[in-house]
Image: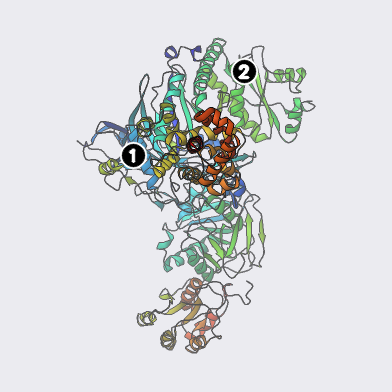
Amino acid sequence: MIMDYEEGDKVKVEKSGVEYEGIVMPSTTGHIIIKMVSGYNAGIEPEGATVTVVQKKSDMETSAKKSVKAEVKPKKGLPKVSILSTGGTIASKIDYRTGAVTSQFSADDILQAIPELTEIANFSGKAIYNILSENMKADYWQELSRAVVEEIKNGADGIIIAHGTDTMMYSTAALSFMIDTPVPIVFVGSQRSADRPSSDNAMNAICAAKVAVSEIAEVTVVMHSESSDDKCSIHRATKVRKMHTSRRDAFRSINSEPIGYVDYSTGEITTGLSFIKRNERELTLMDSIEPKCALVKFTPGSSPDILGYFIDAGYKGIVIEGTGLGHVSTDWIPQIERATEQKIPVIITSQCLNGRICDRVYDTGRDILKAGAIEGEDMLPEVALVKMMWTLGQIQDYDDAVDILKQDIRCEINERSLE
Amino acid sequence: MSDKFDYRELGLKCGLEIHQQLDSKCKLFCNCPTQIRNIEESNHEFFRYLRPTASEMGETDRAALEQSKLKRKYIYKAYDTTCLVENDDEPPTEVNKEALEIALSITKLLNMVPVDQVHMMRKIVVDGSNTSGFQRTAFLAKDGYLDTSVGPVGVGVLCLEEEACQKIEDQGDSIIYSLDRLGIPLVEIGTDPDIISPQHAKETAQQIGMLLRSTGKVKRGLGTIRQDVNISIAKGARVELKGVQALDMIETIVEREVERQVNLLAIRDELLERNASVCDTIFDVTDIFKETQSKVIKKTSKKGKVYAVLLRGFDGYVGREVQPGRRLGTEFSDRAKTSGVGGIFHTDELPAYGVSEEEVQAMRTELGAEENDAVVMVADREVRARGAMESVIIRAKEALEGIPEETRRSLPDGNNSYLRPLPGAARMYPETDVPQVNISKEYFESIEMPELLTERAKRFESEFGLHKELAGKIAYSTYLPLFEEIMEILGDNENVNATLVVRTLTGTLPELKRDGVEIDNLEDKHFIDVCNLIAEGGAAKEAIDALLRALANEPQLCAKDAAEKLGLGSIDLSDVESMVEAVIKERQDFVKEKGMAAVGPLMGVVMAEVRGKVDGKTISEILKQKINKYLNI
């Protein structure tokens, strides 16, 4: 017999002579899940079980102490930093309903979990949206860039953006193109959820705060350099890529060194590359964007119809991730030509990620150039896509757009290959 | 020894918690082998910090909080047998099915009822022993029992969990851990508090050990099984004693904890009679020790502070023994050390350690201490010293109430010291990276119930004609699987029987070890090889000792090569025959005189020449035949 009970009630479950007592937890499988006094959860198949409510949830004093929001008093002389939360692991905790890690934290919660931050700056927090980064869209970049500009206008000396790591590199590239910034804009995330004592969120956030109050007035990503809690790398927005599914040091600068490093134990920043300094540039927002652009990966034997689809579907720009120095099979070339004839810019990038495109070495390459494709130089394919979206949002004229696409705007193209 | 107390009258409640590593091929949450390595073999290291987090109920565990008072660096040694899962750089796999099934077979042996759905939990542990900051653990079964000589003992809990890292070195500010052990599957078996005496505790532990080994799937050897003991007496409190390694110590350990609780209760009663109390103020007495001769204080107070607290009415009690060699002051000191200080001083032991009478008096005056009062002091960096004094105040107040509920560490001499507060339910939250596992009735029924070692010993007696003592010896030995393998390979062999194999494994081997032979070099294949050689007549059973010595020295050899190297290589029977003929010829007169009775004495002569190469029985037969032949001429 099953008495009426609901999640949170204290119940006694009896089945084949064995008794469980505890709080009813959310279940997704139809089992009765009991949290026992020991803290362990156990699942009981309801068939043949007798459930007796010992105490209704409503009659129990919630033992969970509502976290007391300690009023953080601003400290004199500290810079002002805005934390904008977009979701992701760094701002996540377990959803005990579904059992999955979801983003439920607000920016304020980050401050509370990492009190060391309050020694570095006076923070204000704002949740822009709360999504996992795989659900990110181009128009969210616009919303985010406007929020950042708003914060800078209101006097923020630095911006920290808490972001999911999966698509962080797209967002960083987007903000990098959209904003001329006089202050640091730092993206930070975490690879291990914030609810575990080993989470990388605290160290990443503290290092990000250090960069947010530094002289580095660029869009950067600050994340673990190594698996150890030793230092964080300061990656340039247009040269960074997530290169591992789970490691703390998943983020790597490609075709470039990081701008510098933050030592976690001392908080010291060391830089190796030159960077744009605080207040060197005037705040400008260029947030128009053309979302209808595609990144297409060429694979051996894949049909040129794939490219044809995007042309016919009205796409405004196409980035191809080709092989090696920047190749596609010969039968793709007529489709490239068709695209450029229809004033759809085509950029060639490489699946190698490391190294520079050079379509002048082999015949196929030369034919690709003849068909009107743009060599993506040492740009990352994803950055080339974002740059295409932004450029086509800014400029209508095909030739002018192609000019911009070939130029280095935000250090996304290095003139010289150093590694 | 155990008659010191009337345990029944004291209301002793004692339960055991047994942690046993399982011998599965892979770890519980990754595909790494469950292999223990040498620290020198580590090929990589990294370090981390940990911070406590709140549970799903929004609480932070008190044990976790206390551990995190020290911001320590944890250094981890990795191997080519560990992966990103141990590094906490990759999510865990699903629960290892093999380990789950071993655990389920143990629940059957313990007459337990499994849950219908297993939920993996995260138990927060921020001492660095788990890279994640938590131990993965699941409640598997409950409500079992096992029979003992004084009645059944309930087995309330069986959990399947992952083993923690091995601590290699504690450097104070940092701790070095080895990752090889992390993730080895472990069952935790908790008995109900049905144990009524120290002897009963030992018997219960032995019985559980036997059941576990009956599965043939548990790890053996030092550190693969650990016993915790939960003890309370009627007026005392529940104390969890961790890390009891030797079964033989359990009786002493139980007795000493009872002694501690009895003494602490007596101290409480006397303190209350004296109207003792604890002052909350922490006094800064650094100035008093400016010119001190005490090296310890001088060294630490230069960069730090000397703090003191006043315990009204405690004079004489801080130095009172609670266990042989451990005082109430030691309990204060244990707590103080959780803040990172080396130790504390108290007035029951001062002046001493270079602290002068004048300094003690000055301190007493400063604090306003009267004759009956005690003062406890510490010298260290400011934050540590303050933390230490706060801990002492808390512990001293507890002394007025009775016995604090604690997790304590079992010490080699049977005493115990403070480890951390008893962890509460707040340290547990669901491990969402690992899906639940359903244990259907059919699945549980399909799990095979292993044959008990007690039953197996009986079977060996009848099946192999082993003596009762030898049958028991091999059944409980780590060589049990090897014995069974050899018997299966050899079958019925006239040269090698079960008694010879058991004597070799349980008798010859320990003797060789005593002689300093590196028997760790001997693997299963060596024993099988030697037995095969003898079974085939390639060497005599008398040669086992010499062969094993040779193989231990040169493990790369096979038994046959070793025999040859020792000159034990098989000898042609015709050679033996001619040798026997020569011996008879040399001793013609003797043979003529004694007739067939010459066989005995001549055996010695021939054996000396061919020892180990030919079985004694064969030589005796050849001798008989040849003497017969010679006499008939």
How many residues crowd mark 1 within 10 Å: few (<14), some (14–19), many (20+)? many
Near-viewer residue (B433 or A150): B433
The chain under label 1 reads A
Residue behind mark 2: B318
Q: Nearer the viewer, mark 2 or mark 1?
A: 1
Residue at (56%, 38%) from the top-left corner? B611
Which residue sits furthest left? Answer: A1
Near-viewer residue (B35 or B125): B35
Circle 2: element type: loop
Residue at (71%, 20%) from the top-left corner? B363
Whether residue B326 can be seen here: yes
> Hey, what amino acid is under mark 1?
Ala
Query: Where does residue B28 sit, x and y in percent of width and height?
Result: 43, 46
Residue behind mark 1: A42
> Hey, what amino acid is under mark 2?
Val
Residue at (48%, 49%) from the top-left corner? B33
